């Protein structure tokens, strides 16, 4: 180790001075990485990347200015403070990505956390350069300023290249945060070891080692953190996220728009769900002379149930949904019961948590209307709920004169899949008739009416915001791009529907 | 300076500890899940080898005794019951029937312990089809073609393969193939289609299931004189993708490497299946959560109280015109001697030869050992690429992959499931492999199973609740070159009859069923019981 003090040797060739300059480089790299992380993360979570990058970078630079300005109040012991600042940045920056991801779904004002963190890191980074220059005050001022700023800017270049080319693709945001926090803390520890005066800073050494351990542990657990943070892939603020045994339930809210996602797939937007649910329920219910006994398969959000319960004749509504987590949520949360008008706790409603495929095949009973509202056939498990076997089982449960309706994906995006549902229902011995409605958040959406015999031409139902006696007959008109086409039958052992659906929606990764 | 150096060393050591700690966190080895280690009853099996059974203390009579409650024995019993032949008994060494087709169950699902599916049978498998009708697996006919119950045919998606980090549909990779791979795969498939369509000089199909219906054309039988690997080499097909697929197939059906499999048996795998079914289901399989235990149970239910488990048949000898069959009753601890007019030894040859030297030699009869693990998980496996299938094979693994028990379950969507993971110990001599199977501790096997699953399905980390291991010392007869001649060896004289898939040399449900039905009909013919042959 080189002897002497920078104040007396006055040459940058000495190890302590070289270490300090190297730290300027690392500090600059880390600083810019945290800034880029915060911007990227904000764009990812909040959308509108131009705004996010501008505001994050702006506030970060502003905070740096504040830090630099405040450095004047540091009267002595710059090295100790410099090391402490380094360690603080290591903690804040290192945990920034993981912390923000985890905070996102659980805090109401995410921006407060985001900008608070950006300002704090910016402030600390702003302190660094003035402190560093002062630590090196024994040297020729011209050289100090030139060297420190050179390393600072070169470090920034390194960061800006590394971030998009290496770090994002290979490490991801959470790991990158931990890795650079570790680097930050490691620089602090190295300075403590190399600088002759560093030996006095025992507390800082202990802190540095502890911080390194914490960051390494965070890095090792990144996969798990990433899983917890998966809810971050939504366009709107997440206000509720829960993994039940069967699925991931996420509810988002932007202003008055409440959205439900199951396993990342949009189920409804409160802005236009009335269009979907009125179209789902009333054409079938309106064709049953006296709908007393109604069955809903799926529909655990209770929105179809809300429409069914508008009929005063309904004596009993049986709702079979797989997931008690889902029906429980829509029975208890005030915000959600306001939306479904308490349909799941209505005395006429009986909620059964069971697998629809199994339940339908084992059930006995007779229902005047059966509303089939399952998720789209995105995989072969859900695909079983659209097979001939399933429709045969459901048809058994249909009372004389009863009607069934099946939500059947988009006839515009996936016309083949849509008409496959109709063909399959017919193969199960039922009469089928397709119709469609426009639901802005879904697009053009399709349904199939089914009955044992002929399907009545006229429907009588309580008028809604979307469906009226005048508009209902228009739903049965299919322009040529959605018109019926010949398809096969969706069978358990040959689920053509799943393939057609995936192909049409471009989600199939074969 | 010294103090400083010590501090540096101290911090260095601290850093090493910290890095080690981080490494340990990253590579931590969480405790293995619980689970049982079980298998064919070795104590009873070895007792048979070591002898020392008490002399008969009870004496009973039966018309026909079936010794062995695997598929061949059950099929023999089914055939006798079908012909309304009374007075037979079926003795099984184990406490439960089914042989390789046994199953287990836990709170999550029933699952197979071994054999787990039956391909839709060929047109020639008439006896089997009759049974499938009775068991409700064939529900009717359309234009004279059998219609299979869609709920018992393997549901879509049937198979997927983990290849270059992604799951693809089917068992042969479709991407990342070289022109040579594509050329060899196409040539191979074309050749197999040719064999499948081919008729021998005797007018029979070149390759049939049951194999007894295959042509005896000398040119075809000559294939049995070389290994499948040698035959493929001779065709010039060296594509690693093709050879890996062939290896998978040979280990899957025979538990044996292509270099040890007869070329006739190898081609039989690819060219003998011409499933006959309506609705395009001919290429599909019948399967159930508990695997072929469903078929075993279906047959057993028709035998009623004629089945006696826990009976170790240890001596079969001629006694006048009939036979004396000594069976040790494991529950009562005594030996009963059954005097029978005929006996069907429905047991593997190495056991049959021990209880009755007349049953024939054991030369050439080798058996492949397997390990089967039932892995209970509380998350469904996923992975990049196509969604979960029934049979999930990893090109990156020595194991044959896993089947999903709940795929055929009553529910469409399950939160958790049981994955049945298969590993034939084919890369060493069977005797050495059996020793390894016994000697390797259960914890080590579990680690192997877990680590293998997590390669193709890392999302299962932390979701494995149980790993139950099942060791099969003699799981499958190995169809080595020359095996075809064995089926031609003269059977023992009546009233002794043999029934086992090892006579066919192919460890398939259809073969065991055929041999059982064949022996039962021969016994009935010998005893003068009127019946119309199903064969």
Image (tube, coloured by chain):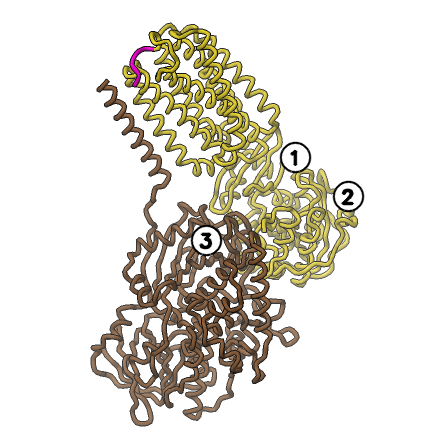
Chain colours: A yellow, B brown
Q: State which region is magenta.
A: A1-5
C-alpha span from label 3 to label 2: 58 Å
- The magenta stretch spans residue B532: no
Locate residue A221 relative to residue B59 in the image: left or right.
right
Front position among marks 1 and 3? 3
Magenta span: chief secondary structure: loop
In percent of width and height, residue A374 lies at: 59, 49
- Position of the N terminus of chain B, as image quadrant, is top left
Locate residue B109 relative to residue A206 in the image: left or right.
right
Locate residue A4 relative to residue B124 in the image: left or right.
left
Using the image, determine if residue B349 lies above or below residue B169.
Answer: below
Locate residue A351 relative to residue A87 in the image: left or right.
right
Give the chain letter at badge 3: B
Q: Residues within 10 Å of mark 1 (few under 14, many from 20)?
A: some
Q: Secondary structure at mark 3?
A: loop
Q: Residue at x 40, y 76 (%)?
A: B502
For this rendering, which residue is in front, A90 or A154?
A154
C-alpha span from label 1 to label 2: 20 Å
Residue at image mark 1: A271
Residue A120 appearing in the image: yes
Residue at image mark 3: B396
Q: Residues within 10 Å of mark 3 (few under 14, many from 20)?
A: some
Give the chain letter at badge 2: A
Residue at image mark 2: A471
Whichever of labels 1 and 2 marks the residue nearer the N terminus, that label is 1
Give the chain letter at badge 1: A
Using the image, determine if residue A247 lies above or below residue B506.
Answer: above
Q: Secondary structure at mark 2?
A: loop
Say if labels 3 and 2 share a chain: no
Q: Residues within 10 Å of mark 2 (few under 14, many from 20)?
A: few
């Amino acid at each position: 180790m080189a002897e002497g003090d920078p104040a007396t040797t006055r040459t940058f060739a000495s190890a302590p001075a070289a270490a300090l300059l190297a730290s300027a480089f690392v500090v600059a790299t880390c600083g810019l990485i945290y800034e880029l992380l915060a911007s990227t993360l904000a764009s990812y979570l909040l959308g509108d990347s131009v705004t996010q990058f501008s505001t994050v970078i702006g506030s970060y630079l502003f905070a740096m200015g504040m830090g630099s300005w405040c450095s004047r109040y540091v009267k002595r012991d710059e090295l100790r403070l410099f090391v402490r600042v380094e360690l603080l940045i290591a903690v804040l920056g290192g945990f920034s990505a993981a912390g923000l991801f985890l905070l996102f779904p659980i805090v109401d004002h995410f921006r407060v956390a985001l900008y608070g963190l950006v300002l704090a890191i910016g402030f600390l980074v702003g302190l660094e350069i003035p402190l560093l220059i002062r630590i090196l005050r024994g040297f020729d001022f011209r050289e100090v300023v030139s060297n420190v700023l050179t390393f600072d800017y070169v470090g920034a270049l390194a960061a800006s290249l590394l971030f998009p080319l290496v770090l994002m693709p290979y490490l991801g945001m959470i790991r990158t945060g931990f890795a650079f926090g570790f680097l930050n803390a490691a620089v602090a520890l190295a300075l403590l070891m190399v600088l002759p005066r560093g030996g006095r800073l025992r507390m800082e050494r202990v802190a540095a080692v502890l911080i390194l351990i914490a960051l390494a542990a965070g890095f090792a657990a990144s996969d798990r953190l990433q899983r917890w943070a998966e809810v971050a892939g939504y366009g709107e603020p997440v206000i509720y996220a829960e993994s039940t045994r069967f699925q991931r339930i996420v509810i988002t809210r932007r202003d008055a728009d409440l959205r439900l996602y199951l396993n990342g797939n949009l189920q409804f937007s409160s802005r236009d769900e009335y269009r979907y649910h009125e179209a789902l329920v009333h054409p079938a219910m309106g064709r049953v002379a006296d709908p007393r006994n109604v069955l809903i398969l799926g529909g655990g959000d209770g929105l179809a149930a809300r429409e069914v319960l508008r009929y005063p004749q309904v004596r009993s509504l049986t709702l079979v949904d797989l997931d008690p987590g889902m029906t429980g949520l829509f029975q208890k949360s005030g915000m959600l019961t306001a939306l479904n008008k308490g349909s799941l706790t209505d005395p006429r409603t009986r909620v059964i948590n069971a697998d629809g495929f199994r339940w339908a095949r084992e059930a006995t009973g007779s229902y005047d209307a059966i509303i089939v509202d399952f998720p789209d056939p995105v995989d072969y498990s859900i695909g079983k709920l659209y097979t001939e076997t399933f429709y045969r089982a459901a048809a058994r449960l249909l009372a004389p004169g009863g009607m069934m309706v099946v939500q059947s994906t988009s006839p515009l995006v996936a016309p083949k899949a849509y008409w496959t549902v109709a063909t399959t229902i017919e193969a199960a011995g039922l009469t089928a008739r397709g119709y469609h409605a426009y639901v802005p958040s879904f697009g053009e959406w399709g349904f199939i009416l089914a009955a044992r015999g002929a399907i009545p031409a006229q429907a009588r139902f309580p008028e809604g915001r979307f469906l009226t006696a005048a508009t209902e007959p228009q739903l049965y008109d299919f322009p040529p791009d959605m018109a019926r086409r010949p398809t096969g039958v969706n069978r358990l052992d040959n689920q053509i529907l799943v393939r057609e659906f995936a192909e049409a929606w471009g989600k199939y990764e074969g | 300076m010294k103090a400083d150096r010590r501090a540096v060393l101290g911090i260095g050591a601290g850093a090493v500890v910290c890095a080690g700690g981080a490494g340990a966190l990253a590579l931590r080895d969480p405790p293995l899940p619980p689970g049982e280690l079980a298998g064919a009853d070795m104590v009873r099996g070895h007792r048979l080898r070591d002898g020392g059974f008490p002399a008969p203390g009870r004496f009973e009579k039966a018309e026909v005794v079936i010794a062995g409650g695997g598929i061949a024995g059950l099929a023999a019993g089914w055939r006798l019951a079908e012909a309304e032949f009374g007075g037979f008994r079926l003795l099984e060494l184990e406490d439960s029937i089914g042989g390789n087709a046994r199953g287990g169950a836990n709170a999550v699902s029933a699952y197979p312990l071994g054999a787990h599916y039956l391909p839709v049978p060929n047109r020639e498998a008439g006896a089997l089809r009759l049974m499938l009708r009775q068991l409700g697996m064939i529900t009717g006919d359309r234009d004279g073609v059998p219609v299979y119950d869609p709920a018992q045919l393997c549901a879509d998606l049937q198979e997927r393969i983990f290849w270059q980090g992604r799951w693809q549909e089917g068992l042969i990779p479709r991407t990342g193939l070289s022109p040579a791979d594509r050329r060899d795969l196409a040539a191979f498939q074309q050749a197999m289609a040719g064999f499948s369509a081919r008729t021998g000089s005797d007018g029979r199909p070149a390759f049939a299931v049951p194999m007894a219906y295959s042509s005896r054309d000398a040119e075809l039988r000559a294939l049995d004189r070389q290994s499948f690997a040698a035959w493929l080499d001779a065709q010039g097909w060296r594509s690693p993708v093709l050879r890996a697929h062939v290896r998978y197939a040979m280990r899957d059906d025979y538990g044996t490497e292509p270099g040890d499999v007869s070329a006739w048996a190898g081609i039989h795998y690819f060219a003998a299946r011409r499933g006959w079914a309506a609705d395009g289901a001919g290429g599909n399989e019948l399967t159930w959560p508990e695997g072929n235990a469903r078929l075993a149970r279906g047959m057993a239910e028709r035998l009623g109280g004629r089945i006696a488990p826990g009976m170790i048949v240890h001596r079969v000898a001629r006694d006048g015109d009939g036979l004396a069959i000594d069976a040790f009753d494991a529950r009562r601890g005594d030996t009963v001697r059954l005097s029978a007019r005929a006996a069907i030894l429905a047991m593997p040859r190495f056991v049959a030869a021990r209880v009755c030297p007349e049953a024939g030699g054991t030369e050439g009869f080798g058996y492949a050992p397997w390990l089967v693990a039932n892995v209970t998980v509380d998350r469904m496996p996923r992975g990049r690429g196509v969604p979960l299938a029934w049979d999930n094979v990893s090109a990156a693994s020595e194991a044959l992959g896993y089947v999903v028990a709940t795929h055929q379950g009553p529910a469409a969507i399950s939160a958790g499931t049981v994955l049945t993971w298969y590993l034939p110990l084919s890369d060493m001599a069977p005797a050495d492999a059996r020793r390894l199977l016994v000697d390797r501790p259960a914890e080590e096997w579990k680690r192997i199973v877990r680590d293998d699953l997590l390669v193709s399905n890392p999302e299962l980390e932390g979701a494995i609740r149980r790993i139950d291991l099942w060791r099969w010392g003699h799981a499958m007869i190995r169809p080595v070159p020359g095996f075809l001649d064995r089926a031609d060896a003269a059977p023992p004289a009546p009233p002794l009859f043999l029934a086992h898939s090892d006579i066919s040399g192919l460890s398939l449900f259809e073969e065991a069923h055929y041999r059982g039905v064949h022996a039962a009909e021969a016994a009935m013919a010998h005893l003068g019981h009127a019946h119309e042959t199903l064969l």
